[in-house]
Amino acid sequence: MATVVMTSLDSKSRAASRGLSDIKIRNLFIIPTILFLIVFNIFPLIYSLGYSFTDFRASTNAPAAFVGLQNYRELLNDPFIWANFAITAKYVIVSVTGQVVVGFGTAMLLNREIPFKGLITTLLLLPMMLSMAVVGLFWKLLYDPSFGIINYALGLGSFEWLANPDMALYAVAITDIWMWSPFVMLLSLAGLSAVPRHLYEAAAIDRAGPFYTFFHITLPLVAPILMIAVIFRTMEAFKTFDLAYILTSQPTTEVISIRLYKMAFQEWQTGRSCALAYIVLIMVLAITNIYVKYLNRVKER
Amino acid sequence: MRKTVAGLLAGISLMFASGTSAQSQELTIFWAEWDPANYLQELVNEYEAETGVKVTVETTPWADFQTKAFTEFNAKGSAYDMVVGDSQWIGAASEAGHYVDLTEFFNKHKLNEVMAPATVKYYSEYPANSSKYWSIPAEGDAVGWSYRKDWFEDPKEMEAFKAKYGYDLAPPKDWKQLRDIAEFFHRPDQKRYGIAIYTDNSYDGLVMGVENAIFSFGGELGDYSTYKVDGIINSEKNVKALETYRELYGFTPPGWAKSFFVENNQAITENLAAMSMNYFAFFPALVNEASNPNAKVTGFFANPAGPNGDQYAALGGQGISIVSYSENKEEAMKFLEWFIKDETQKRWAELGGYTASAKVLESEEFQNATPYNKAFYETMFKVKDFWATPEYAELLIQMNQRIYPYVTAGQGTAKEALDALAKDWNATFKKYGRH
């Protein structure tokens, strides 16, 4: 407690010596930040919530008429929208599972003494540093059935990846896995390096096998950080737009954000698209909440 | 102090005065990024030389064109004085007040007589048959075909074709011949394919492609004045047309499920296909040896007739409109007066633009200027277009949703796809009170 008081006093006196009192710090930094957040985040959020209860179309000069819950009711009864949600869910499951398996597996391989470990780790991180548009165009060429290197390497002839409605979603997910597995790998490496060595030594003395060591020492201790990676990647995968939009235009890859984009900026159904955006927001919040609860439970163990 | 304030006020007034004067000498036209926009920039440079008014043609990629234009309209922005907008926009843009009413201008200059009838009907008039005009036909365009003359004229191929189909190999006169030729040249083992057609469903690519079949098979999308679609969009003629389009898809190069104008030109330049569908506006690249190594052996033909002899093509092209929020409307009007002059339209055609002026189109000089101008001239008098109602974007997306899975993946039948589309369109028209 004494340390806390001392630190507090120290920082106060340091700020005072530079002429920055708490009030000045509040006025200079905190209030502008809050105002910025209100103007650019909170206000549009509330404004769009208002629009979601209207029939407003931004492409016309007609005023918005209040329609109550009609937009929400119509959207939730629209089979196309549910199909878009189903595609999104499938994509999230395939993509995030793939990223966790590949990312965590790579981290396990790198969590040992190997030559050029630093260089290999850096090279593996490159995909996630590229822009989504570049990755999309790059993989479009790789998947090309006439000259793409994937079919050549796998001996698949002129197999259609992106033009095949049953395959296109997996092709997008594979690209996403390639791009974002390094993120999971990075977090997993941090988690793995934090596992105390003495636990492995004790397991070795007790002649525990690698299977037992993995499931009873490694995985439980890395699980909280892995869960954080899963939360981040799930939220991102749920919002996926760029990759699916650039790679293919199959109805089977029309994830919910693409539908939302078309509704808002091609059809100009502003009120309806605001309602859809809120439905998506509520779903993402619900999923994240479930994950966070699970994460807390894992941490408590 | 008083002197300082007076000085400041004078300075500000001078700034505003000079600003207004400078603005009135500049106009901005917004269009999509393609060759005709470059030709238009060349044309308007001549306007600047004549009048001193600087005109800039600002462009954006096709994929963003609609979104960017309507975002600016919705914000009532004055960034663009004129826009060369898609024909489908005319209902949405005029009803929302984004375009200046050009009816008086149109009638004063008798543009009904000056411009080709189809261009007036689809680029300028809204609602249909209302005699209200919102655009001046600027870039006429329609879908035509290019083909590999060297493949078609190879004696061995000609002999083999005649033996198989019983008639001479030549540019197709109808859709049956188009299908036969596509099948004949489809040789995946030689990496040669029969045909390149539009399949991209992001905007209007696939729909325009299918329209070529529908209109030539004698079908329609609906009754544009009553909004009736039942029995029209899902008519037997349209079902057959869609089935034929699906059949043609089977003769396209692999991975052809998201192809539009760029890919369809590549099909000819990269020796991929015997025939390729594309808008005439993209054909200049095919006669240019710098962009097409097969330029000398590339031929062109108009969209073939359907089984009953109907011959139509999907309309492309755009009219030029004055944006309501422009601060230079009068100057823009003066520009349009210059643009519609016979000599300007002639010059526009010389530069590579597709004039809609009937006089220029009918001239021998125009028709002989390129290998495809004659086909273009013939096509421009038999074109039809998509719905131009304000809710056209929803109709377009619904059509893509229904026909794309059938055409590219063979899901369901043509009848099922069109019946479902009729239901969707009915619901949309009901929603907007069109019935």
Image: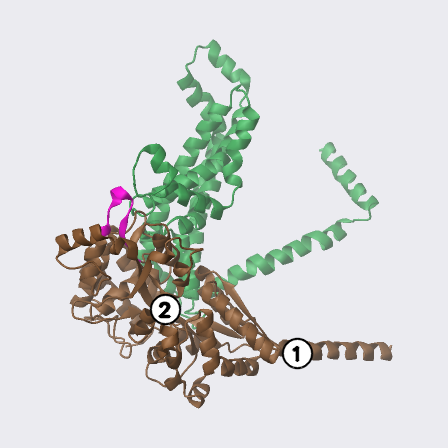
Give x and y (percent) for residue A201: 51, 13
| Left or right of residue A22: residue A186 | left
Mark 2 and mark 1 in contact? Answer it, CB < 8 Å: no
User: Label 1, on which residue?
Assistant: B20
The residue that appears at 27% across and 43% down in the rendered structure is B190
- Quadrant of the snapshot with the N terminus of chain B: bottom right
> Is label 2 in a helix, a strand or a loop?
loop
Q: Is residue B99 magenta?
A: no
Q: Residue drawn at (25%, 56%), measured in percent from left and top?
A: B153
Give the chain letter at badge 2. Answer: B
In the image, which residues are magenta? Answer: B185-197
Label 1 lies in what chain?
B
Instruction: Give the quarter of the figure containing the C terminus of chain B.
Output: bottom left
Separation (CA) of disc 2 from disc 1: 37 Å
Badge 1 crowding class, 10 Å Cα cut-off, few under 14, some 14 to 19, many 20 or more, is few
Q: Which chain is green?
A: A
- Residue at 43% x, 80% y is B134
Q: Nearer the viewer, mark 2 or mark 1?
A: 2
Residue at the image point whose x is 29% and y is 41% from the top: A159
Q: Which mark is residue B316?
A: 2
